[in-house]
């Protein structure tokens, strides 16, 4: 403990921060890349004027609170204060829209990945580029604002993402990592620059050509993993650490999206490797050994932090409805005078789900709190449907909600497996959903008919992955990024593997077909429930 205290006090620890959908987490790692301390802050997006958003005040309060709690954890464990850091990395929800004027003022509230308001722009740009442009990508938001003739568009002088914004405020540098950049607009094949031809096509659109800016002039600089992306300024230190203990000067790695930190945290950056991150949203990332033959509306093509192409299936909805049901049971337990922690509740309920019927006894639920582009829903309504002969048991209820979290993901991955013949030996999963061992993991393995590995660090998630990217700045001259992860990080990592079972696959297939057959119920709910 004395050695670790001195290590931190001497400024050798590395900080990773990730702005997730429901939690901002800060993680401090040591020389062996293990977690020394952590802190987190819970937050929620709000639907304001038709857009899912987080306020700037919420962004900074959340960052400061998560960092303050990290510092408290350090003091409780090691008895020291953080005054210096070896390196820092910032990650956040990929994509979205944050346009600024020439004075650095945000022109409209941050529009997150969760919005499904850019369908027209997404379709037109996909056709123009011959490349799938998802609704949540920054270029889709920008073009939709142009199509809508929104008042702010002529004042735009800089466009970035949440990770890029926080990084800019802390360092003064307008930059993003390669992977984050690939969710703004597609990159050239070298993975180092925005796609030149697509930028030209966009700038030649009549309505865009009238703007007093060029796309190429308002986008952030692109930097690959391992590059220095600036230093913590005096102003940035005050923004991050309200106690005033943290000194300026720590180097920053390029800011990345949560997809890239997920790949890093699961060691899935090499071709033919894959990972799944499950939280408010759920997405699968399959690193490709060759480009896809054509583009698909359901499949995003982004990159690893070093520029390798990745096929991504991104679903807007995953755990929100599960959390809502857990809240109900928490209220019930409290009304009985039972003081159960959230962890205890999740363990109890998830374990009970293992007793559920194979196909959940003809029940089906839709976990759609927001729209889901893969199944062509612009809005969502969480609903539970059952037949008169369905057995409404606790086990079937929880299992139904867990199954529904994986159905849209299965829909997208089926395209890659069946249309593109993509081969993946196993998939590494991460996220709080997998903290209860061998429940959601087993259901996911049955759903995808693929072995699913969950490592010991699954709960650390993207903040730990971001810290690894920051630490890589000091290793890049010796090792390529994939070798760095293999040799320096995951050589000692352990993990549990669940293989698909015959009964599990059969049960999920029946549930999945019911999910597809009853989608019209969900669509009608969107039309009727206002």
Image (cartoon, rainbow, N blue to C red):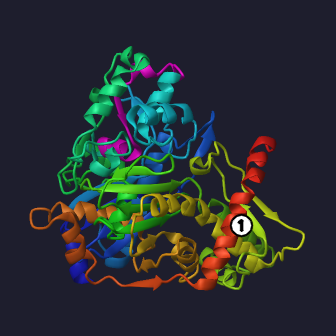
Q: Nearer the viewer, residue 453 or 190?
A: 190
Image position, residue 510 (x, y; %): 69, 71
Quarter that holds the C terminus: top right
Decide if residue 20 is in sight here.
no
Left or right of 438 in this view: 511 = right
On the image, which quarter does residue 274 sit in?
A: bottom left
What residue range appears in magenta? Answer: 148-169
Secondary structure of the residue carrying tag 1 is helix
Image position, residue 57 (x, y; %): 48, 42
Q: Is residue 150 magenta?
A: yes
Q: Mark 1: give few (<14), some (14-19) or many (20+) Cα within 10 Å.
A: some
Outermost top residue: 210
Decide if residue 199 is in sight here.
yes
Tell me what residue is drawn at x 22 percent, y 59 percent: 87
On the image, which quarter does residue 367 sit in?
A: bottom right
Task: Decide: is 495 above or below 220.
Answer: below
Q: Is residue 113 magenta?
A: no
Tell me what residue is drawn at x 37 percent, y 47 percent: 163
Q: Nearer the viewer, residue 104 or 188?
A: 188
Tell me what residue is drawn at x 28 percent, y 29 percent: 216
């Amino acid at each position: 403990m004395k050695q670790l205290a001195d290590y931190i006090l001497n400024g050798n620890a590395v900080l990773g921060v990730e702005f997730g959908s429901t939690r901002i987490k800060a993680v401090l790692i040591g020389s062996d890349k293990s977690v020394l301390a952590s802190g987190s802050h819970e937050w929620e997006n709000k639907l304001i004027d038709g857009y899912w958003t987080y306020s700037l005040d919420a962004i900074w309060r959340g960052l400061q609170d998560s960092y303050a709690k990290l510092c408290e954890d350090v003091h409780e464990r090691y008895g020291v204060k953080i005054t210096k850091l070896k390196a820092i990395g910032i990650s956040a929800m990929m994509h979205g829209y944050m346009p600024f004027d020439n004075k650095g003022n945000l022109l409209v509230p941050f529009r997150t990945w969760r919005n499904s308001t850019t369908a027209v722009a997404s379709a037109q740009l996909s056709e123009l580029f011959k490349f799938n442009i998802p609704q949540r990508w920054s270029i889709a938001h920008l073009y939709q604002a142009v199509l809508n003739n929104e008042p702010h568009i002529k004042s735009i002088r800089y466009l970035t993402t949440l990770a890029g914004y926080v990084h800019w405020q802390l360092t003064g540098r307008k930059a993003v990592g390669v992977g984050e950049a690939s969710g703004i607009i597609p990159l050239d094949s070298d993975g180092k620059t925005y796609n030149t031809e697509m930028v030209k096509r966009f700038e030649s659109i009549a309505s865009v050509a009238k703007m007093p800016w060029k796309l190429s002039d308002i986008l952030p600089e692109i930097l690959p993993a391992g590059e220095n992306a600036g230093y913590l300024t005096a102003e940035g230190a005050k923004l991050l650490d309200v106690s005033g203990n943290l000194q300026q000067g720590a180097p920053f790695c390029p800011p990345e999206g949560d997809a890239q930190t997920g790949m890093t945290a699961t060691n899935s950056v090499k071709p033919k490797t894959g990972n799944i991150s499950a939280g408010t949203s759920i997405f699968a990332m399959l690193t490709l050994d060759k480009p896809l033959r054509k583009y698909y509306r359901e499949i995003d093509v982004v990159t690893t932090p070093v520029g390798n192409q990745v096929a991504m299936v991104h679903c807007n909805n995953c755990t929100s409805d599960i959390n809502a049901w857990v809240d109900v049971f928490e209220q019930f337990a409290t009304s009985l005078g039972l003081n159960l922690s959230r962890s205890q509740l999740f363990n109890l309920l998830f374990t009970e789900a293992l007793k559920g019927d194979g196909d959940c006894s003809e029940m089906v639920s839709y976990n759609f709190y927001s729209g889901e582009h893969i199944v062509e829903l612009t809005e969502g309504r969480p609903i539970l449907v059952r037949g008169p002969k369905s057995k409404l048991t606790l086990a079937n209820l929880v299992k139904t909600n867990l199954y529904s979290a994986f159905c849209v993901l299965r829909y997208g991955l089926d395209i890659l497996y069946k249309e593109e013949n993509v081969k993946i030996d196993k998939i590494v999963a991460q996220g709080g959903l997998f903290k209860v061992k061998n429940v959601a993991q087993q259901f996911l393995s049955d759903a995808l008919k693929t072995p699913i590995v969950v490592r010991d660090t699954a709960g650390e998630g993207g903040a730990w992955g971001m810290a690894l990217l920051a630490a890589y700045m000091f290793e890049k001259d010796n090792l390529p990024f994939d070798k760095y992860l293999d040799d320096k990080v995951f050589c000692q990592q352990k993990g549990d593997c669940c293989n698909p079972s015959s009964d599990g696959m059969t049960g999920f297939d029946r549930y999945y077909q019911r999910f597809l057959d009853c989608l019209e119920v969900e669509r009608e709910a969107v039309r009727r429930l206002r």
